[in-house]
Amino acid sequence: MSGPGSVETPVEPDSRKELPAALQDRDPDYIRRSLPLTWPLISAWFRPDIRGLERIPVRGPALMVAPDTLAFTLAFYRRFGAERPFFQLAHHLVMRAPWLSLLRKYGTIEATSENAQAAVRAGAAVLVYPGGDWEAHRPSWHARRIEFAGREGFARLALAAQVPIVPVVSIGGQETALFLTRGEGIARALRLDRRFRLKVFPVSLALPWGLDVGDLLGHIALPAKITVEVLEPIDVRKRFGPNPDVDTVYSQITGQMQETLDRLAAQRRWPLIG
C-alpha cells in the first residue's frame, strides 16, 4: 500500500470559473504553498498512517465516505496534486467559525445536498462525513464503532450521480480528547437541532479547558496516532443491481467499514501511541 508521500501528476484541471459560487473558494495556489508547512505539523502531531490511497480513482468524480480527518485531506492533495478538484463537506457551523475559515481554501464546503451534487457534477472527488456531529462527538468508548446514525444520503447521492463510493475508515480520532457524552438530551432541551441543525451538545475532558462543555471554542487535540485505510471503490449498481435498495446499500457498506475498523482496532496496542 502506498503512503501519502508520493505526488502524482495532476490529472484533473481546476476550472473555478465553471464552478458554482459555493465551490469557488478552493484555492490550488494556496494549497501548493501551505501544504509543505501543514503536512509536517500534522505528521509530527498525529503520526498519520494513510493506507490505500492508490485505490481512489485517479480521475473523475468519486464519493469518499469517511469519519472526519484533516490528515486524510492533506494526504489526498499530496497524492493527487492541488489541481485535482476535491471538496470536503462540513457542518454549516464549522464553515462559520472564523478560526477555520482557511479550510475553505482547501475545498471545505457546507454540507448541503446542493453543494454535494454540484461538486460531483463538476467531476470532483468529494469527501462526505455521514455521521457528522453525531459520530465526531461519540463517547470515547464508542471509538471502535461506525456510527452514521442511519444517514443514507451518501448512498442516494452516489446512485443519483452514478459515481463510485469509496469507503474510508480511520481510528485514533476519539483519543484526541476524552469524550464523555454527546449530550443529545441537552441539545434537545436547548432546541439546538431546530436552531442550528445540531443534535449534540458534547461534554469532554480536553485541553486547555479541562471540562469542555459544548466544544464551543474548540480544543487542543491530544497527539493520538491516526490510522486511515481506503477501501476498494464500490460501483453501487454493479454490486447491488440496477435498482438497489438504499437500506441494503447503507447496511452493507457500513458493515464493511465496521469490519475494517475492527481489524484496525485489533492492530492498535495502546491509546494515543497506536
Image: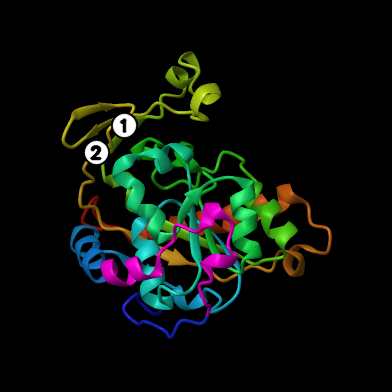
Of residues 244 and 212, the one drawn nearer to the viewer in this rendering: 212
Expressed as whole percent of the image width and height from the top left, the position of residue 48 reads 29, 64
- Contact between marks 2 and 1 (CB within 8 A): the answer is yes
Whether residue 144 sits left or right of residue 204 in the image: it is right
Q: Amino acid at mark 1?
A: Asp
Seen at 43% across and 36% down, the residue is 93
Question: Which residue position is annotated with label 2?
Answer: 219
**How busy is the neighbourhood of tag 2: few (under 14 within 10 Å), some, or many (20 plus)?**
some
Q: Is residue 58 above or below residue 73?
A: below
Residue extending farthest front: 17
Numbered circles on residues, count: 2
Q: Secondary structure at mark 2?
A: loop
Q: Quadrant of the C terminus?
A: bottom left
Which stretch is magenta?
A: 12-35
Whether residue 261 sits left or right of residue 34 in the image: it is right
Q: Secondary structure at mark 1?
A: loop
20 drawn magenta: yes
The circle drawn on residue 215 is: 1
Whether residue 63 sits left or right of residue 54 in the image: it is right
249 drawn magenta: no
Expressed as whole percent of the image width and height from the top left, the position of residue 160 reads 74, 57
Expressed as whole percent of the image width and height from the top left, the position of residue 222 reads 21, 47
Q: Is residue 187 above or below residue 146?
A: above
**How busy is the neighbourhood of tag 1: few (under 14 within 10 Å), some, or many (20 plus)?**
some
Quarter location, residue 157: bottom right
Seen at 68% across and 59% down, the residue is 158
Of residues 29 and 64, the one drawn nearer to the viewer in this rendering: 29
Q: Amino acid at mark 2?
A: His
Seen at 41% across and 84% down, the residue is 8
